[in-house]
Amino acid sequence: MNRFKYCLASVLFLFGAVVMAQEEGDVKEEREPGHYNQSKFKQLYEEFSSPNTYRSASGAPGPDYYQQQADYVMDIHLDDKNAKISGEETITYHNNSPDDLEFLWVQLDQNVRAKDSKSPLRDGNGVNIAYTADNFAQTYISEPFDGGFNIESVTDDSGKPLSYTINQTMMRVNIPQALKSGEKISFSIKWWYNIPDHTVNRARSGYEYFPKDGNRAYVIAQFFPRMAVYSDVEGWQNHQFWGSGEFALPFGNYDVSITVPADHILDATGELQNRDDVFSKEMMKRYKQAKKSYDKPVIIVTQEEAEAAEKDFSTDTKTWKFKATNVRDYAFASSRKFIWDMQAVKIGSKDVMAVSLYPKEGNPLWEEQSTKAVAQTLKTYSKHTFDYPYHKAISVHAKNQGMEYPMICWNYGRPNEDGTYSDRVKYGMISVIIHEVGHNFFPMIVNSDERQWGWMDEGLDTFMQYLAEQEFGKNNPEVIAPNEKYPSRRGEAAKIVPYMAGDQSYISPIMSNPENVYQLGPNAYGKPATALNILRETVMGEELFDHAFKTYAQRWMFKHPTPEDFFRTMEDASAVDLDWYWRGWFYTTDYVDIGVKGVKKYYVSNKPTKEMEKYMADRNLTEADLPPLVYLAEEDSEDFSPELKGKSPTETSQNLKEFMMDNMNEAERAQVKEPKYFYEITFDKPGGIPMPLIVEYTYADGTTENVTYPPEIWRKNDAEVKRVMATEKELVGIVVDPKLETADIDTTNNAWPKKEEKSDFDKFKENIKGDK
């Protein structure tokens, strides 16, 4: 049977070659000029930087890879009465690079909120058709908030002043002599600033004021002068912080003391060093219970206790002391309003505490779901990357927030005042918690440059968020009922179609700086997450993808990867050439659109077709001059005869019959299943991204066959390809991408026979009739 198919295919190939030669011989076209390699499948040598001893061609760190280290000792004071924060910090900076450094760059991100900040002046927008009241007041009426750093001193390790220059959100510290390779330097900065109301100023850090009880809940981050990254890629990464492109930070060790009102509950990056001093006996008892509770959270501070604390406004203070090892940043949350719960999560061979902090305004939703979502995130992400290395992960309730820092994050999700909440709020809260806790992995540990490549943390995290959400749904069916699966907002191919089908003037490649794109959400979150999901489920398969993705995460944990390191590792660990995929999805704004252009039906014939006769006549050939040939006659053409229908190829082609008699024994011939129907199917690709050609064939007997042709089918002709189907059954339908796996932006060309789709107007009329 295999030999028969091979022989028949060979004859069909010869037939196609003959026809092609005839067509080429008949038409004399003007010669076109030459061109460069324009293949969508060429390698990304022009786009990628050259491998070197710092970063290898495999995508792994090279033998000379280095990274700097910045250690901090900080004494922080939170002034609740005046909403101010002040601090003194000593930074010890280790120069592990091969370069001598003439000066140091320190980030002053709070200066984006200084009165003279240039950030509000960057955008050239006209009048909106409407404004929210708060946005209008903030834009046109309110005085700018004075939230920039006040630097009181910068001194060396002996207390002598160091000169410095502040350029917006960057401060250059002018050291007396170059910091040589292998050396370290210590210097101190004293500072303070006014804390913004993040619900008004839309800040990543600040407080929320609760007018009913007069309290504030603080979520404090980007609050101290932080060292910039110096690397083999950028040198100093001292790009200004404008607001969208987030952070690039070196790893280091932190020793932090935070002084707050004595009735505040506080948690932060790092391990609490003086728990006995800041916990009551009852809190300590509950904490020990939580460390042994793996199935549900234990309340450390109850709602009743938090409500009682809201009324006291202690004038005394309490200092919480923390130490953190090998983290890239530091943040904390503090309020007398906080309810506090925890549970243990088994990750590998150790226990990690899943923690939630929230005011009563977050209940009952937060008590029910927050810590549960934290625990699921730690399990799913660890399974796909590496075991979570820190001892805790904290979710903090903050109105309309979604921000991440090592071990701690702020999250959205506020029920109505009566405690009720919509599905939108519930799923929004769970998803944001999963996303922000997931940022512990990307970029807090796999420490990419957020300021330059927002997608490397947001996109990878959103992809992992989708996997965690789906596992959350499977493990908590009562939470998502009546849904059968978690209603993820991003990740599935079909959900990115509106963006990719949109106005190209408002779309940027994923490989763009986050400050320079119109639609940051789809660009840095949705599209890269979808691209990775399609890569996993459709292009590579879960086994190959998961191994490669885990290899990348483990190679670059506690290091600084670039996009090329990710792209190269995914190929290195899978043996799948993906340059075409990275080019289409990440380097361009191309879209996916693949369809069925046409279908021709053929039958085997013993007579030469008119085209074949012309080919022979043009060359003074007869059939005797050629090997025995099999011909295909197109249905309804002048070569077609109705008597060909319903017959097997050996019944209508004497040449084929003789070939089989001469080359196959009786037993082999008895096993042959001869195809009766032959179809030439033309698939076209109006879209720019080559993708696997996923086709569902439907036959007259109601059966279906699914075939996935690899993306390389487009390597020679990026516009259209043809496939010949030889089948025993009559083909009655074809659908491209039947499960909507590829983010095809136009499904109207995906079927044969073409399906009539109702216009938007017809759908509107039907809806009107249905409402009567």
Image (spheres, grey):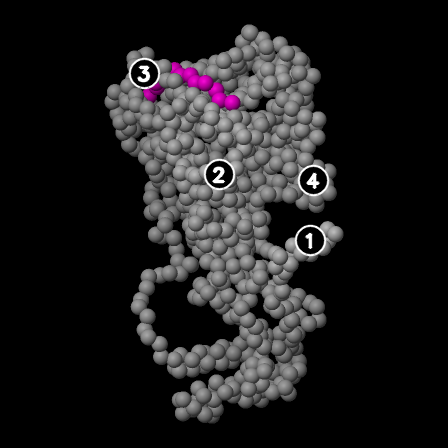
Tell me which amino acid carries mark 4: Ile
Mark 4, mark 3: which one is toward the viewer?
A: 4
Q: Earlier in the sequence, mark 4 or mark 3?
A: 3
Label 4: state its secondary structure.
helix
Identified at 58% across, 27% down, the residue is: 399
Say which of marks 4 and 1 sits in front. Answer: 1
Q: CA distance from mark 1 to mark 3?
A: 74 Å
Of the two numbered discs 1 and 3 in the rendering, the one whose residue sits closer to the viewer: 1
State the CA–CA distance, disc 3 to disc 2. Answer: 50 Å
Calculate the distance from the C-alpha at mark 4 to the C-alpha at mark 1. 29 Å
C-alpha separation, residue under disc 2 versus residue under disc 1: 32 Å
Between label 3 and label 2, give the one nearer the viewer.
2
- The three-letter code of the residue at mark 3 reads Asp
Residue 736: x, y in percent?
Answer: 58, 62
Q: Residues within 10 Å of mark 2 (few under 14, many from 20)?
A: few
- Mark nearer the viewer, 2 or 4: 2
Q: Is residue 195 magenta?
A: yes
Crowd tier of the residue under label 4, counting other residues whose Cα lies within 10 Å: few below 14, some 14–19, many 20 or above:
some
The quarter of the picture where residue 477 lies is top right
- Left or right: residue 119 compared with residue 772: left
Query: Residue 451 in the image: x percent, y percent?
Result: 41, 36
User: Which mark identifies residue 156?
Assistant: 3
Q: Say the numbered circle drawn on residue 767.
A: 1
Compared with 190, 107 (above or below) is: below
Residue drawn at the location 33% of the way across and 21% of the way down: 185
Q: Is residue 171 or residue 547 the one in the foreground?
A: 171
